[in-house]
């Protein structure tokens, strides 16, 4: 449904989008995830035709909408966009807001047909009862549903959503994100979603592209990104991760680190020499037994509990192991005191090996370049 190929967009000297390529199959939910300023909104605006890229190619439903020799204006692209602010018109009723694209847009239709379609859509998103209210008399969550209803009435091939939940409080966000997913499935629309919130991305997406500084770091399913991050940036951005530098040993299975030898089930062939050993808080097994000679075993080391937070169903323990800080999630029944010495073990299946460096050589700052050249 969407193909983005080698997209480049600069603002002056700022490379906002650098050589970004991805494809989105029909009916799926695709998320652009990354920190503030990494280029998410710019990519969405390029797809919508609100920005003119410097290079690359964009095709929607097989039709090229942008290439160096072609630019289809936004109003002729089969898309609808929902913004963070919803862009709901306060001087119009709920009905009139929703009806707007059918009165003025690409999908203009007969007044009778318009009434039928708007009423049916408001019914489906649970706003039928409120259709005569002013849009300002809706709650945040209702306004969001109205923005979605209006976008869906455009019958877009692509629904572009730019942080549509970020104005809402945490509880409402969680319930609306489920709703959003339900609507997307029910309408079978292809959605491109932008967020910097990793838990939102994990919960909603079929596929996620993780971006940093205008470049795609990795594309995968939520599970793939979490279990097999391609580099340290992705490991940190998706969930909590401890990363410890190590050297791959000649047996191809072990990695020697300052915390001892680690072994992994995962493939290490793709890597060589210096790597990072990565593990998640839920993979760390914690024993309150004082360390014995066990810590000479692979994947086992000792540490001191620096803080213990009760999070209801589990404890989050911040552990200091030599000079490394790491987090461990342990059962809430484990009696752990701050300052206590612990034995920690990460099973092989919880050990992920990632390359030790992300190559940003082109964009390295002057001081980094000096360092690199030494
Ligand atoms: N109109 C513009 N003129 C100049 N620079 C811009 C413009 N729009 C965006 N940029 C720059 O391009 C980069 C990417 O911006 P973009 O808005 O795409 O980031 P984002 O990932 O959506 O961030 P956020 O999560 O904060 O919304 C930033 O460095 C930003 O300052
Ligand atoms: Mg943005």
Image (cartoon, helix red, strand yellow):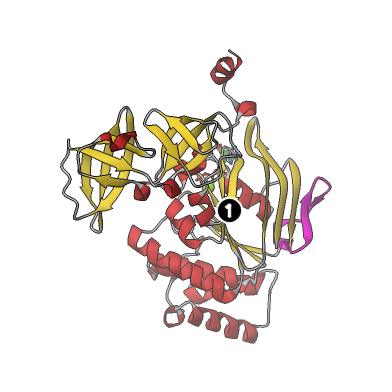
- Residue 301 seen in the current view: yes
- Where is residue 141 drawn, in percent x and y? 40, 67
- Where is residue 63 drawn, in percent x and y? 79, 61
Residue 279 colored in magenta in the image: no
Q: Which is more toward the observer, 67 or 354?
A: 354
Q: Does the residue tagged 1 have its C-beta within 8 Å of any atom of ligand 1?
A: no
**Looking at the image, is 183 positioned above or below residue 325?**
below
Residue 68 colored in magenta in the image: yes
Residue furthest toward the right?
Answer: 69
What span is colored magenta in the figure? 61-77
Q: Quadrant of the N terminus?
A: bottom right
- Where is residue 146 drawn, in percent x and y? 49, 70
**Looking at the image, is 240 positioned above or below residue 112?**
above
The residue positioned 53% from the left and 53% from the top of the image is 224
The residue positioned 60% from the left and 73% from the top of the image is 188
- Where is residue 76 drawn, in percent x and y? 74, 62
Q: Is residue 328 left or right of residue 9?
A: left
Q: Which is more toward the observer, 57 or 244?
A: 244
Q: Is residue 338 left or right of residue 326?
A: left
Q: Quadrant of residue 65?
A: bottom right
Label 1: which secondary element = strand
């Amino acid at each position: 449904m969407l193909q983005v190929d080698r997209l480049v967009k600069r603002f002056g000297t700022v490379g906002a989008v650098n050589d970004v390529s991805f494809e989105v199959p029909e009916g799926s939910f695709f998320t652009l995830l990354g920190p503030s300023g990494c280029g998410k909104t710019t990519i969405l605006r390029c797809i919508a035709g609100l920005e003119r890229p410097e290079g690359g190619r964009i095709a929607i439903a097989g039709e090229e909408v942008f290439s160096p020799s072609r630019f289809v204006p936004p109003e002729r692209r089969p898309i609808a966009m929902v913004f963070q602010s919803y862009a709901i018109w306060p001087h119009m009723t709920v009905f009139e807001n929703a009806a707007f694209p059918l009165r003025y847009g690409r999908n203009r239709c007969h007044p009778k047909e318009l009434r039928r379609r708007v009423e049916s859509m408001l019914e489906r998103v649970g706003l039928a009862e409120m259709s005569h209210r002013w849009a300002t008399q809706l709650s945040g969550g209702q306004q969001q549903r109205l923005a979605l209803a209006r976008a869906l009435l455009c019958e877009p091939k692509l629904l572009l959503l730019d942080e549509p939940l970020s104005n809402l409080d945490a509880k409402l966000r969680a319930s609306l994100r489920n709703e959003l997913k339900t609507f997307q499935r029910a309408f079978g629309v292809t959605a491109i979603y932008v967020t910097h919130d990793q838990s939102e991305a994990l919960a909603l997406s079929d596929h996620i592209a993780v971006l940093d500084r205008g470049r795609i770091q990795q594309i995968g399913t939520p599970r793939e990104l979490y279990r097999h991050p391609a580099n340290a940036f992705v490991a940190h951005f998706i969930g909590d991760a401890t990363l410890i530098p190590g050297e791959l040993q000649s047996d191809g299975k072990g990695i020697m680190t300052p915390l001892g030898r680690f072994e992994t089930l995962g493939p290490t062939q793709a890597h060589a020499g210096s790597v990072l050993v990565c593990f998640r808080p839920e993979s760390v097994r914690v024993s309150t037994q004082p360390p014995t000679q066990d810590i000479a075993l692979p994947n086992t080391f000792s540490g001191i509990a620096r803080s213990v937070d009760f999070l209801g169903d589990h404890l989050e323990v911040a552990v200091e192991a030599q000079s490394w800080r790491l987090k461990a999630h342990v059962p809430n029944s484990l009696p752990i005191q701050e300052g206590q010495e612990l034995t920690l073990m990460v099973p092989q299946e919880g050990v992920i090996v990632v390359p030790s460096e992300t190559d940003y050589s082109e964009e390295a700052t002057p001081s980094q370049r000096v360092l690199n050249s030494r």
